Amino acid sequence: MTVLVKLCGNRSLHDIQTVRTVDVDYIGVIFAESKRKAEPERLREWLFRYPLAPQQKLVGVFVHPDMKEVEYILDTVSLNVIQLHGNETPSYVLNVKETTGIPVWKAIRHQEKGIESMKSFEGLVDGFVIDSKVKGAWGGTGIQFDWNSVPEYTREAKRQGVPCFIAGGIRPENVGDLLKHNPIGIDISSGIETNERKDPEKIKTMISRVMTHEVS
């Protein structure tokens, strides 16, 4: 079993050109208010010019989105996964799934009764993202949480039969420490950037360290 990898926060033509050449599973774009927010019309143009690799799936990240907004974006860009990164309720998640027919991942912030929150979405979501809890931010902070908690999150995700990605503060220099806890997947954004652009060398180093890791 290999570790799933999601490269998130792609916001420019440069970023798309960079990540499409990498052997990873998921490419993330943010549609919520963020410095990494992608405009769907421009994203469509970038992907038309530089399509993702066949094995790569496109993940759209939203925070409490209006369904009209979601439907407009889906009409503009073909998403493979919708990631809800706010305080969305189970009923909200169900509505998104039934309306769009697309797999939904739910972000859970560490220490917000994480396992209990995961259980409340059992049977509704198709995956989880565990991120750091930072006041005033929904994600993309580059701040790491206590990775000793990763095995507990992983066990719960496996019990539910869905993937679980660990996010927050993952960089080439520390990914080895995270991999010791055998996560199912990792979700990286700021840790593979230089001057707010995806850095090919950082990505290459990150992927190399993930690929050489043996899951126990």
Image: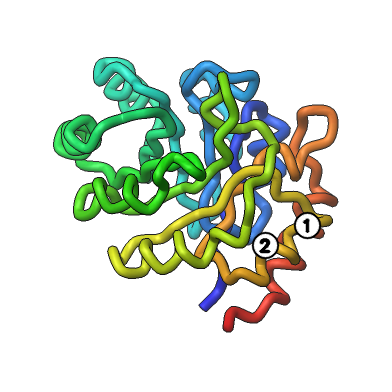
Q: Amino acid at mark 1?
A: Asn
* Residue at (52, 51) in percent of width and height: 26
Q: Which residue is mark 1?
A: 174
Q: Position of residue 156 (x, y in %)?
A: 36, 63
Name the image colouring: rainbow
43 in relation to 174, above or below? above
- Quarter residue 113 falls in: top left
Residue 167 appears left or right of 107:
right
Q: Which of these two is toward me, 72 or 173?
A: 173
Q: Residues within 10 Å of mark 2 (few under 14, many from 20)?
A: some
Disc tally is 2
Residue 201 appears left or right of 103:
right
C-alpha span from label 2 to label 1: 7 Å
Q: Amino acid at mark 2?
A: Leu
Instruction: Name the image quarter holding the C terminus.
Output: bottom right
Q: Residues within 10 Å of mark 1 (few under 14, many from 20)?
A: few
182 in relation to 49, above or below? below
Residue 34 appears left or right of 159:
right
* Residue at (84, 35) in percent of width and height: 194
* Residue at (20, 41) in percent of width and height: 101
Mark 1 element type: loop
Task: Residue 130: give its label.
Answer: none
Mark 2 element type: helix
142 in relation to 164, above or below? above
Q: Position of residue 40 (x, y in %)?
A: 47, 21
Q: Which residue is mark 2?
A: 178
Q: Position of residue 155 (x, y in %)?
A: 41, 68
Q: Position of residue 103 (x, y in %)?
A: 29, 47
CB under 8 Å between callouts 2 and 1? yes
* Residue at (23, 53) in percent of width and height: 122
